[in-house]
Amino acid sequence: MKINNPDKKKRSVDFSLKATWLAISKLYNMLGSAYGLTHSNGFVLLNIDREHGTPATKIAPSLGMEARSLTRMLKTMEENGWVEKGSDPNDKRKAIIQLTNMGKEKRELSRITVKYFHHKIAEQVPQEDMEVFYDVIERINYVVDDLMHNPPTPEDYDREVMLPVDTHEK
């Protein structure tokens, strides 16, 4: 009975996505470290409108972050002089996160880094393969969203279908 074949794990959607995302995150952290940037705060900076700022309530959902994590990160970014809080001219109760001049410079460094990474991918992966990749990712997101709204019950699982072939007794 063979249960833990590492090559089989690498062929699972969740393992592949997580391992790739962790590698990309490490890369961005390495490249950003020379500028005091992390992958996370680089993405936050990229999601703040350069000219008008962005409501704090819109940043976390666009990045898939918890509001508490974003609040801590914005506090640090404010202490670093990258962002400042302003108020919405239409609704004084809403906080608008605005980039300082230093924040705009850090945002530009993040933007250039992301564009360079995409350029390097384009050198290795043909555009038609990227279109297939985006289509597959969109379908995976659809499945995830569907399962989030319609979680399976224990009766929905068919143990014979759910178990990998190589885990069955021979």
Image (spheres, rainbow, N blue to C red):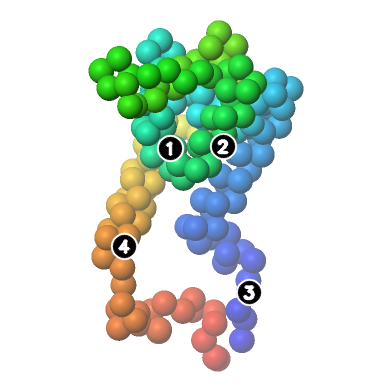
Packing grade of label 1 (10 A; few <14, some 14-19, many >=20) is some
Distance Cα–Cα, label 1 vs label 4: 22 Å
* N-term-proximal mark, 1 vs 3: 3
The residue that label 2 is drawn on is 72
Distance Cα–Cα, label 3 vs label 4: 26 Å
Query: Which one is nearer the viewer's eye here, 38 or 69?
Result: 69
Type of amino acid at the residue the image marks with label 2 = Arg
Q: Residue at x 58, y 23 (%)?
A: 78
Per the image, label 4 sits on a secondary structure element best described as helix
- Give the foreground label among 1 and 2: 2
Per the image, label 3 sits on a secondary structure element best described as loop
Per the image, label 1 sits on a secondary structure element best described as helix
Q: Is residue 12 left or right of residue 127?
A: right
Distance Cα–Cα, label 2 vs label 4: 31 Å
Displayed quadrant of residue 6: bottom right
Distance Cα–Cα, label 1 vs label 2: 12 Å
- Indicate whether 13 appears above or below 29: below
Q: Residue at x 54, y 82 (%)?
A: 167
The residue that label 1 is drawn on is 60
Packing grade of label 2 (10 A; few <14, some 14-19, many >=20) is few
Q: Residue at x 31, y 62 (%)?
A: 147
- Give the foreground label among 3 and 4: 4
Q: Is residue 115 visible?
A: no
* Count of numbered circles on the image: 4
The residue that label 4 is drawn on is 147
* Badge number at residue 4: 3
* N-term-proximal mark, 3 vs 4: 3
Circles 1 and 4: CB atoms closer than 8 Å: no
Q: Residue at x 63, y 43 (%)?
A: 23
Q: Is residue 31 left or right of residue 62?
A: right
- Give the foreground label among 2 and 4: 2
* N-term-proximal mark, 1 vs 2: 1
